Image (cartoon, helix red, strand yellow):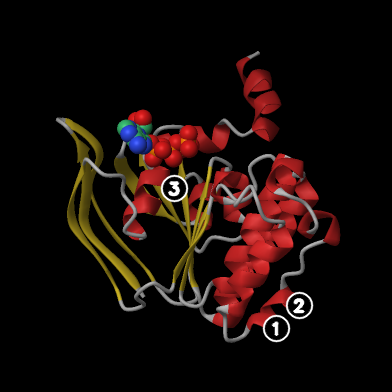
Amino acid sequence: MLSVDKLSIQSDDICLLSPLSFSIAKGEVLGVVGASGSGKSLLAQALLGQVPNGFNLSGQVLHSCGDRRVLAAQSASVLDPLRRISSQLSYALSRVPKGATRKKRFPLAADITRCYRHQLSGGMAKRALLAQACWQASEIMIADEPCCGLDTQAAETIYQHLAYLARSENVAVMVISHNLRQLLTVADRILVLRDGKLVEITTSAHIHSGNCDSYTQSLWAALPEHWGRTNANAA
Ligand SMILES: Nc1ncnc2c1ncn2[C@@H]1O[C@H](COP(=O)(O)OP(=O)(O)OP(=O)(O)O)[C@@H](O)[C@H]1O
């Protein structure tokens, strides 16, 4: 569905993303993990053809779905401050053939839809952005930190939505997150970035068995639920 060949991004003489190649199949969820500033959002922008002006992009992003690539944005700043969420989402929905079914499948609470952007909490904005993207996604969906700032239950629902899009609707899904544990609940494979470089593309089984790059292991060990164990081991 989507194939990336030796994609790299430079700004002036700084290499922000070193050449990397991978693909995402229909029905697959690819997780992307890496520390802050490792290039995850730039990668998403490149896949959507939205790299900021002034950046040099080389390599190829191949896909066959025109503008049917959808981004669940990281920031609520993409929402129109002058229109209620319901009005913005109705417009998004009107452009989707299976709109009514999608809306039922990925419902959004009325306490969110009746708000303007400035009235939303961070978590409410995230849910609005994700719902909009789920309603629209037909072939490729990219979710940039969809669960950042959400409580565990809301995050779980969002990951269930993403899994449904892939498994039942055959959408190719890429999910970016800092949280490796959450990614492992849904991703078929995990792409690990470090300082703009591809570390590896691995799987949940390899990470759980420790059969992965030492950097990936360090991301796993850094999860809050492992903090106690690390300290206990050190003691
Ligand atoms: N518009 C921009 N202009 C200049 N540099 C940028 C721009 N956007 C990103 N960068 C740089 O590119 C690098 C990667 O940024 P990117 O936003 O992709 O990181 P990230 O992994 O998504 O981080 P985070 O997890 O904090 O969102 C960083 O060094 C960042 O400073």
Residue drawn 67% across and 71% down?
A: 90
Name the residue that disc number 2 marks: 104
Q: Is residue 164 above or below residue 81?
A: below
- The quadrant of the rendering that contains the N terminus is bottom left
Quadrant for residue 187, please give it. bottom right
In space, the residues marked 1 and 3 are separated at their CA atoms by: 41 Å
Which numbered disc covers residue 177? none
Q: Considering the numbered disc 3 on the image, is that residue within a helix, a strand or a loop? A: loop
User: Mark 3 belongs to which amino acid?
Assistant: Asn
Q: CA distance from mark 2 to mark 1?
A: 5 Å
Q: Is mark 2 within 8 Å of ligand 1?
A: no
Drawn side of residue 26 relative to residue 122, left or right: left
The x, y position of residue 233, in whole percent, is 63, 21
**Marks 1,3: beta carbons within 8 A:** no
Answer with mark 1 or mark 3, whichever residue precedes in sequence.
Answer: 1
| Residue 75 in sight from this viewpoint | no
In the picture of the structure, the residue carrying the numbered disc 1 is 101
Left or right placement of residue 16 versus residue 102 in this view: left
Foreground: disc 2 or disc 3: 2
Instruction: From the image, state whether disc 1 or disc 3 is nearer to you.
Output: 1
Q: Is residue 140 visible?
A: yes
Q: Are marks 2 and 1 in contact (CB under 8 Å)?
A: yes
Residue type at the position of mark 2? Lys
Residue found 43% across the figure and 74% down from its top: 68
- Residue name at image x 77 percent, y 59 percent: 113
Rendered-image quarter of ligand 1:
top left
**Callout 2: few (<14), some (14-19), or many (20+) C-alpha neighbours within 10 Å?**
few
| Label 2 to label 3: alpha-carbon separation | 41 Å
Type of residue at label 1? Answer: Thr
Ligand 1 within 8 Å of the CB at mark 3: no
Q: Which residue is mark 3?
A: 211
Q: Toward the viewer: 203 or 98? A: 98
